[in-house]
Image (cartoon, helix red, strand yellow):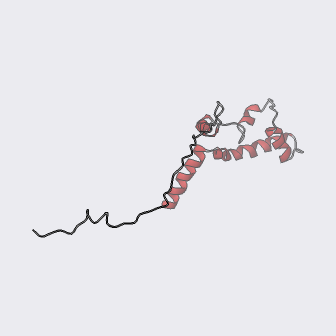
Amino acid sequence: MKKMATIALFCIFLFGSTEAYQLLKLPLLVEHYLQHRSENPEISFLSFLKLHYNKKLIIDDDWQQDQQLPFKTQQSANAFMFGFVSMPSKPISVQVLVIPYSQKTFSIETQQVYSFTFLHDIFQPPRLA
């Protein structure tokens, strides 16, 4: 049951937010190809695809049917996706932040005094009164 629910939710997401819903129009493509094939029996499937998916826009008698073919138009329901993919209209400028550099010198004393007598006056054991 969980597997079926997962598949159903995945399909709803896939067909609702991507262009995968265009695959549901494949029967229209086959039907339109068979219609062209009945008018011209010598047309191949590749020439049919070239005729309908060429970059040139050809408006003929069956233009309305051509617009219903898969991947021919984009629905406005998926227009929200283009906001994430589109480039910003203003150019992006990157500025390099220059951190001022100052050189400091430290002096190291060569004579070091290690005497534990300094601590003798501070730390003393508790005395009994």
- Identified at 63% across, 45% down, the residue is 21
Q: Where does residue 4 sit, x and y in percent of width and height?
A: 52, 58
Q: Where does residue 73 sit, x and y in percent of width and height?
A: 70, 36
Q: Where does residue 60 sit, x and y in percent of width and height?
A: 81, 30
Does 121 sit left or right of 54 as displayed? left
Q: Looking at the image, can residue 44 be seen?
A: yes
Does 84 sit left or right of 27 as displayed? left
Quadrant location of the C terminus in the rendered image: bottom left
Number of numbered discs visible in the structure rendering: 0
Residue at the limit of the structure toward the right, as seen here: 42
Up/down of 67 relative to 121, above or below: above
Does 54 sit left or right of 18 as displayed? right
Q: Nearer the viewer, residue 114 or 17?
A: 114
Q: Nearer the viewer, residue 22 or 79?
A: 79
Q: Where does residue 25 sit, x and y in percent of width and height?
A: 68, 44
Q: Nearer the viewer, residue 99 or 11?
A: 99
- Identified at 65% across, 44% down, the residue is 19
Residue at the limit of the structure toward the left, as seen here: 129
Q: Looking at the image, can residue 1 be seen?
A: no
- Identified at 12% across, 70% down, the residue is 128
Does 25 sit left or right of 35 as displayed? left
Q: Nearer the viewer, residue 37 or 100?
A: 100
- Identified at 55% across, 52% down, the residue is 10
